[in-house]
Amino acid sequence: MSASGPFQDKPKFRVDALSVARGGRVLFDGLSFAAEAGAYLEIRGANGAGKTTLLRTLAGYLNPRAGQIAFENVEEPSLALHFVGHQNGLKPTVSVASHLRYWSGLFGGAIDAGVAAQKLGLGALLDRPARTLSQGQARRLSLSRLVLAPRPIWLLDEPAAALDANGKAMLGAIIDAHRADGGVVLAAVHEALGPTPSQTLTVSA
């Protein structure tokens, strides 16, 4: 996919001979790949193979035992990444609107919270506390941080979990729009999200 849009610097990163261990067990060794502007990479593998660990390592939350992760055309990697884990990270008694405002302030949001809510199909739920949301609605709220504050590189761990068919179509459209803007997406998945991946990585323990 050709990239054009707000990420004109064409962010990219490269992983060389990456080795990662968890609990003293090597999950993968010598892993190398690259992702350029407009890329969508799917990470596949059995439960426990290391998909989440790989994403957390790329996000800087874990240190690899060997290898290198190099970012290009990115001034500060920690400010260029959105990491959305498989847990939604919501406060049960806090409203949808308050979550959106908090994330907008935390990430330096450039998009109005109400606009983000409409994009995620949450416009009618702004006053609802998170504990009253369905699992699919809670997942949509968690994903809203992706559109609240544009960042070029997305690291997504099972992003479609609990989403219905409409939710998955919405997520696919958001991913395609991000790629068209020059962004990069890596997603750990069990099944295809919809967008055609430019590369598929398979990790195995």
Image (cartoon, rainbow, N blue to C red):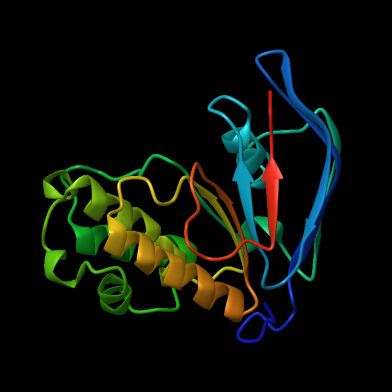
Q: Is residue 133 left or right of residue 61?
A: left
**Nearer to us in this view, 101 or 96:** 96
Percent x, y of residue 192: 50, 53
Numbered-mark total: 0
Residue 22, picture quadrant: top right
* Residue at the image point whose x is 36% and y is 60% from the top: 168
**Nearer to us in this view, 160 or 125:** 160
Residue 81, picture quadrant: bottom right
**For residue 201, above or below residue 121:** above
Where does the C terminus fall, quadrant-wise?
Answer: top right
Where does the N terminus fall, quadrant-wise?
Answer: bottom right
* Residue at the image point whose x is 74% and y is 79% from the top: 9
Percent x, y of residue 123: 18, 72
**For residue 16, above or below residue 177:** above
* Residue at the image point whose x is 62% and y is 27% from the top: 49
**For residue 56, above or below residue 28:** below
Q: Is residue 201 left or right of residue 141?
A: right
Of all residues, the one furthest to the top in this rendering is: 24
**For residue 203, above or below residue 94:** above
Residue 196, picture quadrant: bottom right
**Nearer to us in this view, 159 or 150:** 159
Percent x, y of residue 158: 46, 45
Percent x, y of residue 23: 65, 14
